[in-house]
Amino acid sequence: MPGVTKHIFEKDIRDIFHMWNSQLKTIIPILPKRYTKEDVIDLLKKYYPHEWKSVKIKYNYYTTKDRHINKHKKRTRYNMQNPTSLIKNVSLFKKITNKDYQEQHYEKYDEIYKQKMENQLWNKRFPKIDRINKKINKALLKTQQMYPSFLDKLIGFYESKNTSQKDRMYILVELKKYYSSKIIQFFFKLNDTELNRQLRENAFYHLQSFNYQPRLRRQKYIRIHTKNKKRKEILKNIYAKERCCIQGNPQELEYRINNAKEQKIKEYDFFISHSYLDSEEIQKLITYENKNNKNVFCDWICDNDYLKRKLLCEETLKVLEKRMEQSKEMIFVESDNSKKSPWCKYELNYFYNLKKPIYIISKNSIQSNNFQIKTMDDLWFIEEDFNKLDYHKLLLLNR
């Protein structure tokens, strides 16, 4: 195992052991009168759920790396144990699961003291657990929790030698819009191997937003995989320092849609036509469709970094038209808000003229967890001259 790689892995294991020793000290006073190794682990999972999950993530990460190495070199490098096995090597865990210690605990056990300490620990831990849960949920709301097939192509574009640093930044923007184990593993890989500092930090902060607790790798420890001296110098001294600023506006997105590979390959199962005032119900619908592996276009999730309400312009409409063309079907979320929306009416007319299926679901149905969509038979929205509508008039109206 290369020296730097070995050092990082061993430090990860030491950090995990140190964390568990500290946590186990707080668990000891609340151990039941009689307990097993499984009871100790269950208490750790209850009071330190995110910390336990962080070890599982490390295990999955190193196991994936071993699998990749084994596939190409017929050997493994890390051989990290799963969390349940790994914790049995921790000094304090060994001590408190020792039979002699368990007998001493049994003899000294005080139920009143145990209840008191249990309440104290929960009062201390709950606010932290709740804060992290809210942080993760906030990050998840900005994503779709599924993995559309075109993301494989995006990752392929990213890893191509000919892809510029700027294009890689745009690709990361698109990858961040989806949440899956495969995407998270890719961001961990970038955090470990990406030479460009801006891209590496981008991956690092994205992982942090989901509380994955990554360690940002320093450039001097990252290997440059080329024997070409000229290319090596370019990667080390030029590419590594390149930075770009993405213009978050509709004009930029419209340009990328017409000219960039990461936008041209996109496709959606559903385009959601809706009123932003019904955002809570829209989020529920998207979550439901994601569970059925459906990729959904919703402007304030899928293009929220470009389509800001304060920047409405003609390009905003062009982007929405392109997204409808990239969508197989439409779902119109019917509500008092959406039926009054000129934007929804425009979208319905545009999609109808694409001769693609349009479905309908009511806001009330979503609220009652009934997600059955129906074919839209009532064509109340049809306007023959809808495409001659004054853009500027429409842009002045709320969605």
Image (cartoon, rainbow, N blue to C red):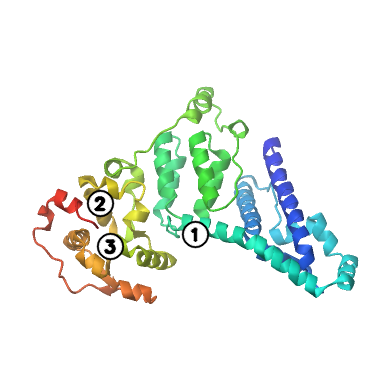
Left or right of residue 357, residue 161 in this image: right
Residue 42 visible: no
Mark closer to the chain start, 1 or 2: 1
Left or right of residue 136, residue 113 in this image: right
Amino acid on which the number 3 mark rests in the picture: Ser
Q: Which mark is residue 338?
A: none
- Determine the residue positioned at 52% across, 59% down: 134
Image quadrant containing the N terminus: top right
Label 2 sits on residue: 322
Badge 1 crowding class, 10 Å Cα cut-off, few under 14, some 14 to 19, many 20 or more, is few
Label 1 sits on residue: 137
- Determine the residue positioned at 75% across, 52% down: 17
Badge 3 crowding class, 10 Å Cα cut-off, few under 14, some 14 to 19, many 20 or more, is many
Residue 24, above or below 111: above
Label 3 sits on residue: 275
Splitting the image into 4 quarters, where does residue 29 fall?
bottom right
- Determine the residue positioned at 62% across, 46% down: 69
- Counting from the top left corner in percent of width and height, residue 201 is at 52, 39
Which mark is nearer the camera, 2 or 3?
3
- Counting from the top left corner in percent of width and height, residue 378 is at 17, 74
